[in-house]
Image (cartoon, helix red, strand yellow):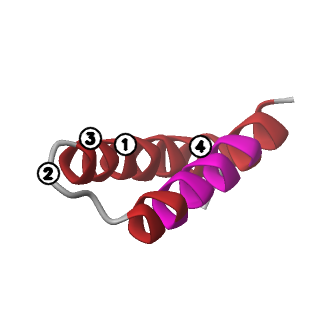
Amino acid sequence: MTRLSRIESLKTRHFRIDQKIMSEGGRPRPDARVLMCLKLQKLRIKEEIERLST
């Protein structure tokens, strides 16, 4: 996998996780543990994207 394709794959995953966060946050009683886990995954992906972009 080339670096550019890896970055695109990570951006897609980042977007999907963001959608899950918004979906969970829109529930009447969002699960704080689920939100924390999703946000941590999103942060790790963002950091990897930044690392690969430099």
Position of residue 43 in the picture relative to residue 10 (left or right) = right
Q: Which quarter of the figure has residue 54?
A: top right
What span is in magenta? Answer: 37-47
Are circles 3 and 1 on residues that touch, CB within 8 Å?
Answer: yes
Instruction: Spot the residue most to the top.
Output: 54
* Residue shown at the point (65%, 41%) measured from the top left: 46
Tell me which secondary structure the magenta stretch mostly adopts: helix
Task: In the rendered structure, find residue 18 and report the number of the disc placed on it.
Answer: 1
Marks 4 & 1, CB-CB < 8 Å contact: no
Label 2 vs 1, first from the N-terminus:
1
Q: What residue is at 53 percent from the left and 50 percent from the top? A: 10
Answer left or right for 7 relative to 31.
Answer: right
Report the front residue among 40 and 54: 40
**Residue 22 numbered tag:** 3
Marks 1 and 2: in contact by CB < 8 Å?
no
Kindly identify the amino acid type of the residue bearing the numbered disc 4: Ile
Identity, as a three-letter code, of the amino acid under mark 3: Met
Q: Which residue is mark 2?
A: 27
Residue 26: image x %, image y %? 17, 42
Amino acid carrying label 1: it is Asp
Circle number at residue 7: 4
Q: CA distance from mark 2 to mark 4?
A: 31 Å
